[in-house]
Structures are given as structure tokens and as C-alpha cells.
Amino acid sequence: MTNALFSTRFGGAMSALACAALLSACTSTTPVLDASFGDAVRQARAAQTLNPNASANRDPVLGIDGQAGAAAQERYQESFKAPPKTFEIINATAN
């Protein structure tokens, strides 16, 4: 067999195989997993929601008056102005 005959006979087959390999890279390999992607997050969020219709309730919040709420808000804001006091840790090792 000569080189010209060899390249003519197998050149088309090799290019067809290369095209098939390139096209197969575009297919999804996990259609079952992709169909349920994010379900765990949605289930966890639903399990942690006490009342899904809470935003529809327009009644005022009971249990804290305005002065106490304002003081709590002020303490919260002040906590960011001065960093908390730190303490030194002595790293003692036993010999």
C-alpha cells in the first residue's frame, strides 16, 4: 500500500472520528443529577422557615417598647466603633 492510498483510505475515517469525539464533548453526562440540582438547598430553606407567610402579617411586633429597641440598636451600632478588648494567650507546653 502506498502512502497516498493509505492517507486517502484512512484520512476520512480519522477526521470523522475526530469530529465525533469533539461533538461528544458537548453532551451532558449527568442529566439525572442536573434535573434535581438545588433541591437540597430548597428543602433546607423550607425546613428552616417557621412561617412562610410571615411577610403578609402587618401587625406591629409585640414584646419590646420603643425605648428598649432604640437602646439595643444604639448598643449594636456602638459595638462597631470600638473593637472588643483582646487578651493574651500564653502558649505553655509541657516538657
Image: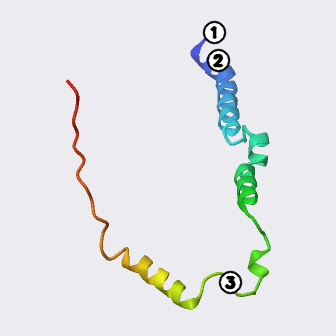
- Asked where in the image residue 45 lies, by quadrant, the reply is bottom right
Looking at the rendered structure, the kind of residue marked 1 is Met
Q: Quadrant of the C terminus?
A: top left
Way the structure is coloured: rainbow
- What kind of element bears circle 3? loop
Looking at the rendered structure, the kind of residue marked 3 is Val
Image position, residue 85 (x, y; %):
28, 64
- 3D distance between C-alphas at marks 1 and 2: 6 Å
Looking at the rendered structure, the kind of residue marked 2 is Leu
Which mark, by number, is residue 75?
A: none
Residue labelled with disc 3: 61
The numbered mark, 3 or 1, whose residue comes first in the sequence reads 1
Q: Residues within 10 Å of mark 1 (few under 14, many from 20)?
A: few
Say which residue appears at 61% left-offset and 21% top-offset. 7
Disc tally is 3
- CB-based contact (under 8 Å), mark 1 and mark 2: yes
The numbered mark, 3 or 2, whose residue comes first in the sequence reads 2
Image position, residue 49 (x, y; %):
73, 63
- Asked where in the image residue 28 lies, by quadrant, the reply is top right
- 3D distance between C-alphas at marks 3 and 1: 91 Å
Residue labelled with disc 1: 1
Which mark, by number, is residue 5?
A: 2
